[in-house]
Image (spheres, grey):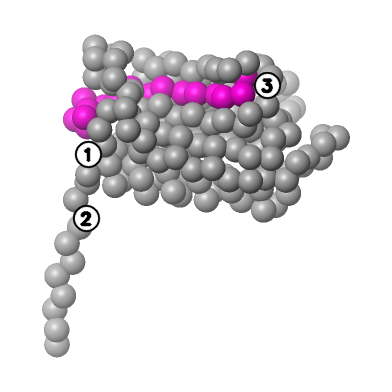
Amino acid sequence: MTTTAVRAPRAVPCRRGRDVMSERFKVSARGGGLPPRREDACRVGIMRRIAAARLRYCGLDSMLDDVMVVVSELLTNAIQHSGATEISLTITVEEGGVEEGGFLCVRVRDGMPGTCTAQWPADTEESGRGLLLVDALTKGQGGDWGTDDAGTETWCRLALPEATQV
């Protein structure tokens, strides 16, 4: 009988100002309030898995749950509401804030101008709570969120946990 030792991979710290990940993907143009194609909707899960792997690689495991919610909600909004044909997801480690501990910044760019605001949906609505979740998560961690470039990019900053500040 042979015994094989398996060593867990070591986390590689991500440097400030560097991308944890940067991915871009094509989606089908939509119109008339139609739901997204299945292939396009599946991209959210794919990007979420890639982001989770990159966060683990960088030793940011403790942020996984919150970042997965943010990634899901921002990408879903871009696919459902923008009408864009290309969407990008970028996650970076940034300096400043929270007593200079730094932030993990999630950016979703769809290239389509527009407004993005968190609004309370009616109790009977099945959707429309995503940005409220993003708002609650970011404020709970001393971060913030908003849009840039006339609404073509939505961003969210989450404070880095003390143990993983890089």
The reply to whether residue 126 is visible in this rendering is: no
Check disc 2 and report its element: helix, strand or loop: loop
Check disc 1 and report its element: helix, strand or loop: loop
> Which residue is the site of mark 2?
9
The image quadrant where one finds the C terminus is top left
What is the quadrant of residue 2 in the picture?
A: bottom left
What is the residue that sits farthest to the bottom in this orientation? 1
> Which residue is the site of mark 1?
13
**Which amino acid, by three-letter code, is at mark 1?**
Pro
Give the residues in magenta: 151-166
The reply to whether residue 90 is visible in this rendering is: yes
Residue at the spot 38% in from the left edge and 24% down from the top edge: 158
Compute the Cα span from label 2 to label 3. 41 Å
Compute the Cα span from label 1 to label 2. 12 Å
Mark 2, residues whose alpha carbon is within 10 Å: few (<14), some, or many (≥20)? few
Residue at the spot 14% in from the left edge and 78% down from the top edge: 3
Residue at the spot 36% in from the left edge and 19% down from the top edge: 141
Left or right side of 35 for 147: left
